[in-house]
Amino acid sequence: MAARRKLRGGMVGGGHGSFIGAVHRMALCMDGEAELVCGVFSSDVEKSRAFAEGLYLDPARVYGDYTAMARGEAALPSEQRIDFVSITTPNDSHFAIAKAFLEAGFHVVCDKPMTCSLAEAKELAHIVRQSGKVFALTHTYLGYPMVKQARHLVREGSLGTVIKVLVEYPQGWLAPLLEGDDLTFPVWRIDPARAGPSCCIGDIGTHAESLVRYITGLQIEELCADLSYYIPGNRLDDDGNILVHYHGGAKGVIHASQISTGEENGLNIRIYGTRRSLAWRQEQPDTLALKDMDGTTTTYSRGSPLLCEAAKCASRLPVGHPEGFVEAMANIYLETFRAMSAQQDGGPSPTGDFPTVDDGVLGMAFIETVVASAVSDRKWTKLLI
Amino acid sequence: MAARRKLRGGMVGGGHGSFIGAVHRMALCMDGEAELVCGVFSSDVEKSRAFAEGLYLDPARVYGDYTAMARGEAALPSEQRIDFVSITTPNDSHFAIAKAFLEAGFHVVCDKPMTCSLAEAKELAHIVRQSGKVFALTHTYLGYPMVKQARHLVREGSLGTVIKVLVEYPQGWLAPLLEGDDLTFPVWRIDPARAGPSCCIGDIGTHAESLVRYITGLQIEELCADLSYYIPGNRLDDDGNILVHYHGGAKGVIHASQISTGEENGLNIRIYGTRRSLAWRQEQPDTLALKDMDGTTTTYSRGSPLLCEAAKCASRLPVGHPEGFVEAMANIYLETFRAMSAQQDGGPSPTGDFPTVDDGVLGMAFIETVVASAVSDRKWTKLLI
Amino acid sequence: MAARRKLRGGMVGGGHGSFIGAVHRMALCMDGEAELVCGVFSSDVEKSRAFAEGLYLDPARVYGDYTAMARGEAALPSEQRIDFVSITTPNDSHFAIAKAFLEAGFHVVCDKPMTCSLAEAKELAHIVRQSGKVFALTHTYLGYPMVKQARHLVREGSLGTVIKVLVEYPQGWLAPLLEGDDLTFPVWRIDPARAGPSCCIGDIGTHAESLVRYITGLQIEELCADLSYYIPGNRLDDDGNILVHYHGGAKGVIHASQISTGEENGLNIRIYGTRRSLAWRQEQPDTLALKDMDGTTTTYSRGSPLLCEAAKCASRLPVGHPEGFVEAMANIYLETFRAMSAQQDGGPSPTGDFPTVDDGVLGMAFIETVVASAVSDRKWTKLLI
Amino acid sequence: MAARRKLRGGMVGGGHGSFIGAVHRMALCMDGEAELVCGVFSSDVEKSRAFAEGLYLDPARVYGDYTAMARGEAALPSEQRIDFVSITTPNDSHFAIAKAFLEAGFHVVCDKPMTCSLAEAKELAHIVRQSGKVFALTHTYLGYPMVKQARHLVREGSLGTVIKVLVEYPQGWLAPLLEGDDLTFPVWRIDPARAGPSCCIGDIGTHAESLVRYITGLQIEELCADLSYYIPGNRLDDDGNILVHYHGGAKGVIHASQISTGEENGLNIRIYGTRRSLAWRQEQPDTLALKDMDGTTTTYSRGSPLLCEAAKCASRLPVGHPEGFVEAMANIYLETFRAMSAQQDGGPSPTGDFPTVDDGVLGMAFIETVVASAVSDRKWTKLLI
């Protein structure tokens, strides 16, 4: 990488009580390639300042809102101002914040889902293209080394032709609401005004869909979605089962749930080819199973010298020393840093092994198609794109 | 149980090359409650005799066909003739054989799926009722002790209200056909004349459906089925993904497959309630996981003193001494033996903890509904019953 | 095999409350190669008869004691009398019973440990040799197919040179006695008069030792044993940790325990070679892991076409259909049946893939050496043989 | 915590090719509580500067050797100079470096084993006490949240009285040397001049011993050690099996190995009490199993609200989002930061939940006792302290 200096980042959102904000901050700095220097952590500037103090930020770089931050940072001398912003607010503000920073000349790292509608997503893609800046969408799970190894094995043909993909994302964190118990934290995800058209599919179904697409390259042709609203009074889905046809003949099932009592963060994928199959589980991310027809399974470990370059490159520790979720997120960041540095060095093409605004557009198309199918009596529906 | 003598069984089918025939024979005798004394093991009587010799059967009790066997056994004195017949032929002959033996006054143990059509199934149910004999359908997996414990936990309310059920049955044994490789054994299951309207759903999808029904009591209201025909030239389904709505509001996904490369016999079920959830895997049948909202999982072992009576009763060995598939089948047999003995002793009601002809009717209704949905553009379809 | 008739067996011991007696009976008959026709199931002949009635045995073949049985059976015409006896009594009577039946001309299947002393064991070996009959010691775990595959992989050199072996056998069934709770069943194993010089090592330590020897062929040169007597008032060991040096330079650790709270029947072995290593767990007996230096593990499944002949031959069901403890015991029986039939057919050498009286001698040598080391201040002690 | 500023750290060692140096750097900064500002990364100052450039350090703070660094930093104004140094050199220099920095007034974080001899260790303990500074030894594994939960469960009596402890630490990274293959990296650990009296026990056996002590509080009374030197030409142990007696009557087995082919970083511990037992595996650090006598196992997940305060405090992410080795190390650092800040704030007692110099003394006593036992014909030997 060999940038001559650490990159400087700012953050919008991610203040008190935010899980993903903390993850972004750890991921941003853990490899020593960047530091957080400014931010807006609350709509209440006093709260924002108090929070920033805990991060040891310069109080002068804590802004009242994202507009002020974009303007203020742009006005700083180049040796002080940020290179990029990380957006970790609820979904409804992603578009406006991303737009503001891109137009002010900053790279953007944005949490998912990208926007609240497909239309917004397409407009954002246009803005990104106009800006020429790096835009990364943090589908964290794509940063795991063994996901990259899975992609490699599929792409090199180890599986033969992929004919079936099962991807699941069961969680149980909303389950206490089923019988009226309270959660110990506020939930903006079930509020349509903040979350957009979907709760469960928007929050985690898109992770599942992006995982299939990243590993296999398969594109959805049509789908049939059965969304559920188990939580009393819920206006957004908290669970969904989806049958999928991919272009080229492969089929699949996606299910995602936030009310699957007792499940933790059970994203997992099984990919069946005409020769072999693959299985990976996010909760044990350091191994990948390749199953053969002959009754043997080969399990690869992160850290193995046999892995592909992308998997090795995304790995910090030797076999047997677990890496986790923060490292996966940090891998997304490292790839964006590479792209940012390449551009600083005059390189033309801010690309790399990270999800882009185009992935975000496909993600929003997936969400809107799922909702469209569900509300039209769960009919098979072509991908709206 | 305490019958004064071992029960005597005969077998139709299950000769050379039959996997399930061998399982029935081991299950029938392993607990010392019954013995096999006669049979028809091939349509070629010479082959049948040669096979029977390996079983040490009396050559006089090897018959040329099932009609001769039903007639011949019925003509024997009561201290010699069989009590029951085990039917392990391909699906297309189940109905006729069962009818013949029931009408000749014998109990019947029949492999699944029960018949080749719902109409036949209903007729068979009528015949069974008329006969007053025991009729058991060998959904082997219902014989596992931890399946009984799962049923117990659901029924006693440990899960709260069941809202979602995921049941999977991936196998890979037909996968070599995907790219034109040969199997090492003949496959009548892909022949519509022998197998009936479905291969994959008929063979293993019904196991999955019966497992859900046995444990939870849920009845299917409607479903949407996406069947696949991946094997070149296949006229019957080799894979299916099915969305299900159960009466009362629970939803589910069933997928079954015979072309999931590298999978062995991966039947598994996850049942989500409003309070807790359950997970059980056939390939590790001796444990059952009960998951709580609080981040703990309790794993029960077969053999534990905490299990329900039905689970304890279906268990032979202490914890840590694995029991398997044959024992599960033997549990089905033991329950039918109890019913047969109860009837011998003058009891009125030949029931017990085994799948009956009514389960067979529901199984055929499931198969026909799945096929109907699949061929009508994968539309949501009410259960045909 | 193709014997012209089923073999006939008798049993001494294994009556009411005996776990292992029931296992022997199921194993004996489940493959249809033998039947149980007579026995002594209690020292109280009335209890014995009542028990035998539940087995549907001819009351005339229920004997008052083993002497009467050996004499009575020998007096029967050859088409009625037993071929073999299964001895499932406490350890202290194995020697006398085996001697009686061998001298009466019967084959013997005997539970382990073989005798109560090395001297007795050597004498029994002499008697067996004199008799020319088949003598099998039921180290059940050697009957598992994947144990045979492990043996095959070691013997064919897949591991390179074996340098280290870890074998563990933790159980917890005596743990309730630690704090004075009662067991729900009587325990003769902690009584020196019935069990011999050791409880834990005699009962399960010998299984561990025989497993190492069967798979690797390694012979113990010297050992250092730390036995424990955790149960208040216990005169025999309930736990032992043993360091081992094998002839040829390999080293190992054996630990066995009956007071390891919460453990079920956790026999497991790990074998390290200079090129690869193996791991097998009895509680999940159908898989075997082969670990490479390169960060990959290959898992073999029982039923795979890649397995060695012995593993395939010991397997009844396809991959994914679990086999368990009874099947493992049945495999020991099947091998003895092959040897018995071979001898009937005039073959000279009653051998096969089952543990013999010589394994029993080595097992008793192991027990006596462990006890000798433990009582002499846990000194390193050469194998007493 | 609420220090008013980030703490500043320096590093000695951990340059090109160092695995543990990179871990220290990530752990030091990932929580945003400290930053690395200076160091000596090689005995060759040019290499050191080149390496430091990749870390974006100020070239003026890259020193030629540790003496210059201690002196140089001490001479800086307090708002610039470091608060602490991290020592990640080979074992032979730990003592001198730690001494230099302590005497120059800096806190010290030191990798393990602490020194090359027990005598040095005791002297260092004296120096630490004299200095009044924080001294932490990075037994990384003690930083895992579920290790803290295990400690909590033992200490609160959930297990009853602990009577047996099995701790294993198999690795395979030196196995290629067994048959003369090369490693892809230099190995100072097998050089007595750098590593001290032991390779395997010094490097990883001490981790195993410290894990037992941390969780259970048990202190070794005597031990019997069988060390091996499998690698041709090896002067230090590459494998060891050790029987242990703890004060108070508990017993145990420790085995550690660097030549266990195919093993990765398999540290694991099983703790048996009179009421329940615990099992934890470092390779899946986020779960902890509590086994009961009744045939149930309760599995706790990191992130569960049921965990003890120390486990919750050491956890960053919700259940199901894996944390790993770097986070465990970061937890050690966070605790030392709390102690450093407490001292800055005038607090008297620089303690916390991290391993101290006294743990290092016990670790060196363990190593010397193991070696003493091994070289004196593997005799039982009292702990040398």
Image (tube, coloured by chain):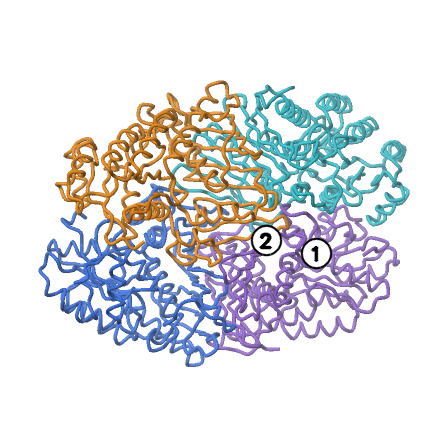
Chain colours: A orange, B cyan, C purple, D blue
Disc 1, SS? helix
Residue C58 appears at what percent x and percent y?
Answer: 80, 49
Circle 2 or circle 1, nearest the eye: 2
Using the image, tell me which numbered label, if any, was put on residue C287. 2
The residue that mark 1 highlights is C331
Q: Nearer the viewer, residue B283 or A28?
A: A28
User: From the viewer's perspective, is residue B371 above or below residue A9?
Assistant: above
Identify the image quadrant of the C terminus of chain C: bottom right
Looking at the rendered structure, the secondary structure element under dot 2 is: strand
Q: Is residue A283 above or below residue C120?
A: above
The reply, left or right, for residue A91 in relation to residue C143 is left
Residue type at the position of mark 1: Asn
Asked whether the residues under the numbered discs 2 and 1 touch, taking CB atoms below 8 Å apart as contact, a structural biologist would say: no
Q: Among all residues in the image, which is located at the extreme bottom? A: D376
Q: Earlier in the sequence, mark 2 or mark 1?
A: 2
Q: Nearer the viewer, residue D212 or A76?
A: A76
Both on one chain, marks 2 and 1?
A: yes
Residue B309 rendering spot, x and y as whole percentages: 57, 38
Chain containing the residue with disc 1: C
Identify which residue, D377 or A266, lies in the foreground.
Answer: A266
Q: Chain of mark 2?
A: C
Q: Is residue D150 left or right of residue C29?
A: left
Compute the Cα span from label 2 to label 1. Answer: 17 Å
Please identify the quadrant where the N terminus of chain C is shown: bottom right
Quarter of the image holding residue B180? top right
**Residue B130 in view here:** yes
Which amino acid does the dot numbered 2 rest on? Thr
Q: Position of residue A159 (x, y in %)?
A: 57, 46
- Can residue D290 be seen here? The reply is no
